[in-house]
Image (cartoon, grey):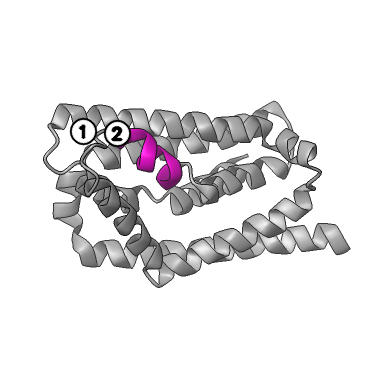
Amino acid sequence: MIELFVSALITFFVVIDPPGCAPIYAGLTAGVPPVHARSMAIRAVLIAGAILVVFALFGQNILAALGISLDSFRIAGGIMLFLIALEMVFEKRTQRREDRAQKIIDTPEIEDVSVFPMAMPMIAGPGSIASIMLLMSKGHGVERTLVILAALGVILALTTLALVLAGPLMRILGARIEAVVTRLLGVLLAALAAQFVIDGLRASFF
């Protein structure tokens, strides 16, 4: 179970990317009173956590209702995560997030960014939803479910901390260090995505 916890922890950290969410949130909440910014950060993580837990517990039932096998989802999810990894390595994912954030900033009537774009799609996006469903599909049991949810809880706590401390964190890290971290995480995610695809192909054809 320790191996499962570490694997889930790394997967969620790479996909949700708390350090990567911090500069986006700092830009979205520029000029917002600190108390309001903190409350939006906490609300965004709680909403995203609720969405991910729902997919963790009922995602397989949703797939069954749609007639999609778990192996097919592993392959499709792995390919999608690999594409996200490529974007991270070549800095395209960060640019897309910044563009999305800028659109929100340029829309004056939108003040609360906790639901969109922070909760969805930045935290509980396609990558994190696919990741938690793939991890849950590898086995059953209450203990396994609790271990995966515990790993998710740790990453969501780190995400909350990153958002709350977004301003000071950006001053400490700087753009260059953030770029290096993003690329390293992208390489790790690519390896994890390849493993998901291999598992799906092996189960389907061998």
Q: Please give the residue where the numbered disc 1 appears in the rendered image.
A: 37
State whether the magenta stretch is mostly helix, strand or loop. helix
On the image, which quarter does residue 109 sit in? top left
- Point out the image quarter for the N terminus: top right
Instruction: For the C terminus, give its image quadrant.
Output: bottom right
Residue at figure coordinates x 51%, y 38% from the top left: 151
Highlighted range, magenta: 113-123
Give the residue at mark 2: 41
Residue 97 % position (x, y): 35, 56
- Image position of 82 (left or right of 29): right
Is residue 64 toward the left or the right of residue 88 in the image? Answer: right
Residue beneath the point at 50% across and 45% down: 9
Three-letter amino acid code at disc 2? Answer: Ala
**Residue 63 belongs to magenta span:** no
Q: Is residue 133 left or right of residue 17?
A: right
Q: Do the residues labelled 2 and 1 touch (CB within 8 Å)?
A: yes
